Amino acid sequence: MVTVTLPEIRKAQPLPETKETALDIQELDIYYGDYHALQNVNLPIKKNAINALIGPSGCGKSTILRSINRMNDDVPGFRAEGTIQYDDVNLLHEEIDTVALRKEIGMVFQNPNPFPKSIAKNIMQPLKEHGLYSKQNLSKKVEENLKQVGLWEEVWDRLHMSAYSLSGGQKQRLCIARTLSIHPEVILLDEPASALDPIAMAKIEDLLLTLKESYTVLLVTHNLQQAARIADYTAFFYQGELVEYADTKQFFSNPKEKRSADYISGRFG
């Protein structure tokens, strides 16, 4: 199959741009064979905000992230119907260039996954893959991106040491810096702090609050306190259904749906 870039898709299949949203999920149904994993999801992902997806395990939160980034395409039996609109592009278009897509919409996973390279080369590798080869520019970008995630002062004197020498929280911030190095518009994070100690988790949360000034953040979390602390908007999923979506303060103080209230109060989950 011939792939085309995002600009080519935009030209060939224009959709109305929604100014307040970075992503607009419309009538999304996800199947794995006969299993209906997500059912008629309609969800706006607000620009320059932290958008949290919460709900019990297996409710479809991570499936949404992987569908946005087209990481489920090779899963046997996977099928997506509906629209995931990014600017004026339907990301479910069958001929979309996933390399171009993942440059604009980056992803950070639950367990830190630095490359088996030095700290500096973890930042340099994606830059080289996108055509930035100047040694001076690469060094500048390494410093810039590590400062962006608050890691520079901690590692500036050991940039050539293995990324595996870092602590868990440092590794995760390095992975975020690596994602930011190629200037995405949207950052998808799948439980990025769940494996970290409270101090490291607080650093990740502070970082996300800073990043939302320049990026759109879509965060999957099981931690209700984390969502309440840092999210601007919260979407609650249960058994593949979007039960409720609201401003975070409103959601936690006055949920409209009984299932939302029950989940927040710990009656199930």
Image (spheres, grey):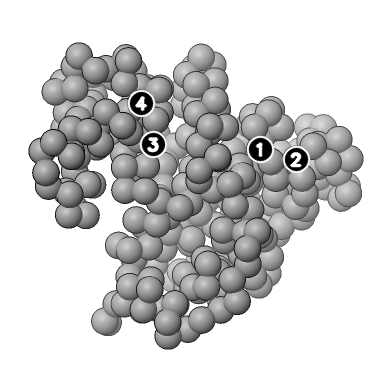
Decide if residue 221 is on the left or right side of residue 117. Answer: right
Seen in the picture, residue 56 relative to 131 is either above or below; the reply is above
Q: What's the residue type where badge 4 is placed?
A: Lys
Decide if residue 220 is on the left or right side of residue 146. Answer: right
Residue of label 2 = 248
> On the rendered image, what quadrant is the C terminus found in?
top right
Residue of label 1 = 231
Q: Position of residue 198 (x, y in %)?
A: 54, 16
Q: What's the residue type where badge 1 is placed?
A: Ala
Residue of label 4 = 147
- The tag earlier along the polypeptide, 1 or 4, is 4
Q: Nearer the viewer, residue 135 or 61?
A: 135
How many numbered marks, from 0 up?
4
For the residues bearing labels 3 and 4, Cβ distance under 8 angstroms: no
In percent of the image, x 32 and y 15: which residue is there? 153
Q: CA distance from mark 3 to mark 4?
A: 12 Å
Q: What's the residue type where badge 3 is placed?
A: Ile
Q: Few, some or many C-alpha atoms within 10 Å of disc 2 (few <14, some 14-19, many ≥20)?
A: many
Q: CA distance from mark 2 to mark 1?
A: 6 Å
Q: CA distance from mark 2 to mark 3?
A: 24 Å
Residue of label 3 = 176
- The tag earlier along the polypeptide, 4 or 2, is 4
Q: Position of residue 70 (x, y in %)?
A: 41, 63
For the residues bearing labels 3 and 1, Cβ distance under 8 angstroms: no
